[in-house]
Amino acid sequence: MAGQGTKIKKKKKSVLKRAAQSGQRADVNRANRTRVRTLMKRLRTAVTAGDATAAGNLLQPTLSAIDRAISKGVLHENTGNRYKSRLALAHNGLKANAAK
């Protein structure tokens, strides 16, 4: 378990179980958040580089990863929707420039 550990004050069975579950959830949430951020970074890099085909290939997996993070409670719904909107706008702008 990386990062901050859960402080355990009592040795009760329920407290120990709760601390273990908290650590496991933190690891899962961190992995999901990292996956979303990496995909978003790749998509933004493709858009700024002007690579329309790479951006098109990355858009759908990125949006579905954001949706998955929202459903798992890693991202708030409004935050995820804001990310999706901005990424889609950037991709559409790139497509419009490529069509000219």
Image (cartoon, rainbow, N blue to C red):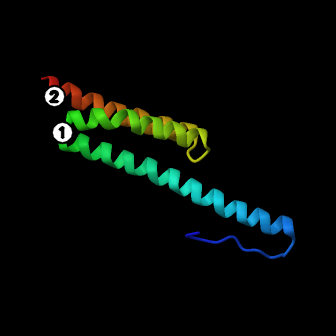
Q: In the drawing, does residue 26 fall left or right of residue 83?
A: right
Q: Secondary structure at mark 2?
A: helix
Residue 27 in picture, x, y percent from top left: 58, 60
Residue 63 in picture, x, y percent from top left: 43, 35
Given residues 40 and 17, the one toward you in this image is 17
Q: Residues within 10 Å of mark 2 (few under 14, many from 20)?
A: few
Callouts 2 and 1 close, C-beta under 8 Å: yes
Question: Extreme left residue here?
Answer: 100
The quadrant in which the C terminus is found is: top left
Tell me the number on the disc at residue 98. Answer: 2
Q: Which residue is mark 1?
A: 50
The residue positioned 28% from the left and 28% from the top of the image is: 92
Residue 74 in picture, x, y percent from top left: 58, 48
The residue positioned 54% from the left and 37% from the top of the image is: 78
Tell me the number on the disc at residue 39. Answer: none
Q: Residues within 10 Å of mark 1 (few under 14, many from 20)?
A: some
Q: Quadrant of residue 76?
A: top right
Q: Is residue 14 above or below residue 29?
A: below
Q: In the drawing, does residue 55 fall left or right of residue 40?
A: left
Q: In the drawing, does residue 3 fall left or right of residue 23?
A: left
Marks 2/1: CA distance? 8 Å
Amino acid found under the numbered disc labelled 2: Ala
The residue positioned 51% from the left and 41% from the top of the image is: 79
Q: Is residue 6 above or below residue 27?
A: below
